[in-house]
Image: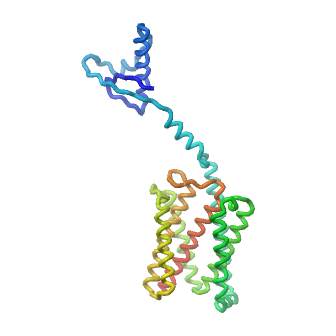
Amino acid sequence: RKMDVEVSGPIDFSAGDYQHLVRKAADKSVQSKSGKPSTSSYPQEAQRNPRSKTNEPKNSYVVQISDDTNAESSNRTSSSPFSDRNVRRAFIVKVFLILSAQLLVTALIISLFLFWQALKTWVLENPWFTYAIFPAFFAVLIILACCGNLRRQVPANYILLGFFTFLQGLLLGAVSVYYKAEEVLWATAATTLVTLALTLFALQTKWDFTLLNGVLFVFLFVLMAYGIILIFVRSYWLHLLYAGLGTLIFSFYLVMDVQLMVGGRHIHSDLDPEEYVFAALNIYLDIINLFLFILQLIGLGR
């Protein structure tokens, strides 16, 4: 609806002052059509602008009021699966419980490989065990990442995630036997401190790291290509640079995935409430990769 409104003073539109102008313009329109004076009075306007209008220039504005924008924004908010704070809170609690269980199981498996001397010796004498875990590990990872319907079905999602966590623990345990127990413990402590610090930073910062999703994906592929080159190139400084870059990239990934889970003001936070397994898996992989690169840094430093 459009109408001409005469404005003789400053109007605060955010305070709703425009409403009496709209009513006044509507009464004038009715008065001009019927030829009768309007019965509406405006004491508030008279008190607000006691000056004479004849001495002031009159400015004519066209005010267009539409409810489409408000309706669209309200529909978008109501259609969001996390519009209810209780749903988001329950989702976050479930993700952290699953993540805690994964990290506990992984730590127990690594401890077996570190402190069970017979198992440690067997893994060192049979390197095929480490390479045999890789196919099963990546197969379960691809299923969890690509089969969205399967990872939302209970108990199939918990079974797959538990099997994946077990394989990841075996893989980390097989890798840890090539390091001293002291180095693994230092890497575990450093990873714990870094994870807690980055999680608190992700929850408190006003920066939106979810915008870096595409950039980090490109950096991850560059890091993978760099790692393949290092298989054939033996250089201490190149391996040290590789470990440092990996630590930095997965630190950013951890902050981004935490913000994706928390949602709120972040732009790209479109996880479904049923994707708690997928959210826990992302953060778990960030922490594990962070641990591996920190362990490599400690091993190279010593």
Q: Nearer the viewer, residue 110 or 217?
A: 217
Q: Position of residue 72 (x, y in %)?
A: 53, 39
Residue drawn at x 50%, y 58% is 210
Q: Quadrant of the N terminus?
A: top left
Q: Residue furthest bottom?
A: 125
Answer above or below: position of 282 versus 232.
Answer: above
Question: In the rendering, at what x and y percent does residue 41 appear?
Answer: 42, 14
Residue 126 location (% of width, % of height): 66, 90
137 left or right, relative to 248: right
Q: How is the image coloured?
A: rainbow
Label tally: 0
Q: Quadrant of residue 39?
A: top left
What's the residue at 62%, 63% (across, down)?
280
For the point 48% across and 63% down, which residue is it? Answer: 214
Q: Quadrant of residue 56?
A: top left
- In the image: residue 116, left or right of residue 68: right
* Residue 54 at x, y percent in the picture: 27, 16
Residue occupying the far right of the picture: 155
Which residue lies at the image location 40% right of the left edge and 28% below the top edge? 63
* Observer-nearest of 121 and 30: 30
Q: Is residue 249 above or below residue 236?
A: above
137 vs 81: above or below: below
Residue found at the very far top of the displayed protein: 36
Q: Depth check: 52 or 185 in front?
A: 52
